[in-house]
Amino acid sequence: FQEVPKVGAEGTYPIMMMIFNQGKTNKFNKTQTGACMRNKMVEICPFMALSFHFFWRWHCQKETFPNMENNGNWFQLKVLYGARPQSRSSEKKGKGKGPERTGADSVVVGNDYGEESSDDEICEAGNQNPLETAISKGTHTRFMKIALNSAGIFVTRKVTHVPRSSAAKMADLAGVPESQIRRMGQWNTDTMTNSYLDSLPRQFMRVMAGFENDASYHLLRGIEEPCSDLKRMVFPWVDYWRNRHANNAVNQTTTFLQDAAVMMDVIPEHPIWKHELFKTQLFLNFQSKVKSHITSNTETESSILRRFVPKVELQLSSINQILREFNERQRQSDQAQRQLQQAFNNVISGKQQLQLSVRLNNDNQATETTGTVASSPHTNINNTGTNVTSPPQPPQHPSENTSPLVNEVPVISPTPNTTANATISLPYTNEGIPVYKMSRQVATVTDLWDEWMVGRDGFWSIEELESKWGTKWRSHDRKWFNIRKKIIDAVNDLQKDIGLSSSSAISVLQGVMNARHWSLDRLGTELQKGTYFPSPETKRRKLGLP
DNA sequence: GTGCTATCAATCAGACGGTT
DNA sequence: AACCGTCTGATTGATAGCAC
């Protein structure tokens, strides 16, 4: 970490530099650098990400801070380590389907990687410290895919290369000169760039961090300086070794505290906030000061906007209005689509009878057949549509429509189905009662409520199954049902006791699950045990308290 | 030659379900 | 309800083979 002066303005700002001397385009071990600065948006700030990563490891995971007495103790440690912390792979021989590997090619000493240094070699070493094991290529790819997919970006090729190309494109769109982009991406080959220029393309860094120029580098969350007592609580080990080595380099204590003050509102449910540091009065005081800087400045910007560009604000508010209307229409459209999907599922599953009209025009004698079909994925309609096979007596479908034509319906009894995934047909008992195993894929209160009240994949809802066949449909799934029922009861309790809508009640329970890191099963168990009540009112009612 | 995907094996946490 | 062995799914490391 370095503190660099602003160009053309007073003050400095911290930057994080990475130094590397090997890589695909660096065949001659030339020392190259990459650098970044604090981002305007705390959510994507690399300082935030790295300092939270370290805080989590040293405070929450209780990882031992390395002894920095000499370089050999910590030079091989990886910032992002890849092996399982509890991995016992050293006892095993070889993994994967390939031939067993020998340990001979796995020893990596110093920086002399020679001609072929692949990640795999670093990953191998038999009894190596997991903290010294680099993240594998496959894991890197998976992490990238998860991150990209969660942002709605689907990449099929060069997944790990995406930031390299997209950063260049983003910078180009933001007007960063090509020369700067070349320098950041190490795409230059001319002698001047390679040998003489400062390797930090400051303009590129600033734009990617959300700032126009050095003078405009002004972080609202960076104004408030934490007191030394608070700072000492963050990375005390780092402070210790910095003092021993008389190292004045910037450390992340201040930026961590400033970022934490804001991030707590961005991801309030993250378990890191359980740490005692964030409950101390020192931190709470500091956090309120940081927030006051942010809110006061936001208002200033808004008043400036009102004073100088009233029309812009008017336009913005009308655009907002349009967006709201658009969202409302979109919501209605989504709802209609869901209803349509539900109706379609009902038809597929046989819950809803379907009227078909078939006209055959193959020859001059046009035939028209009309029939009502309680359809099933196994429904067979032969060429004429009138030659009906006599099916085994179908179960009593919970359909309310009984058509006079129902006896013509070609329904084939669904074949028994034992896999949880292939839910397109239901097995039936000899008495014609469907045997439904509740979905193991359901992990949220919303999905459970849906399965209970609407039914999954077009099958009967649990409510319907209960009302039609009592407990018989679930003779092999009692425990699961009973635990889940407690959650449905809790939703109903919230509606009854404090007047919430069903969707609000579902949100409340889902919020509890998220905050406490409970699975559905855990929530159900806690409700069953009476160790958790959805509301104080419910608790009073159930326990008969005044 | 390199990056990526498909695939297998190892491992772990948590769910499941039978027994007491 | 507690216990405990088994099952299941998720995660990770690793390799072969394909595409470029």
Image: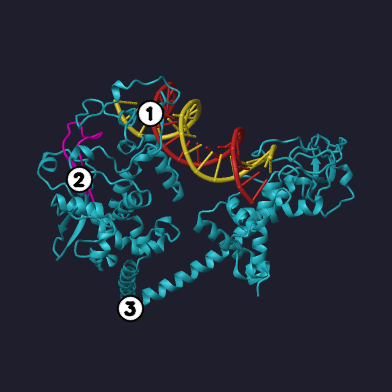
Chain colours: A cyan, B yellow, C red
Q: Which residue is mark 2?
A: A183
Image x and y of residue A72, in percent: 20, 37
**Mark 1 vs mark 2: which is more N-terminal?**
1
**Circle 2: element type:** helix
For residue C20, above or below residue A147: above
Residue ID at (83%, 36%):
A384
- Residue type marked 2: Arg
**Circle 1: element type:** helix
Report crowding for label 3: few under 14, some 14 to 19, many 20 or more residues within 10 A (C-alpha): few
Q: Is residue A273 covered in magenta?
A: no
Image x and y of residue A253, in percent: 26, 58
- Residue type marked 1: Ser
Q: Which residues are magenta?
A: A17-36
- Regarding residue A40, the answer to whether it shows in the image is no
Residue A381 — which label? Answer: none
- Looking at the image, residue A469 sits to the left or right of residue C19; the answer is right
Measure the alpha-carbon separation of dots 2 and 3: 40 Å
Q: Could you tell me if the residues under marks 1 and 2 are in contact, i.e. CB atoms within 8 Å? A: no
Q: Chain of mark 1?
A: A
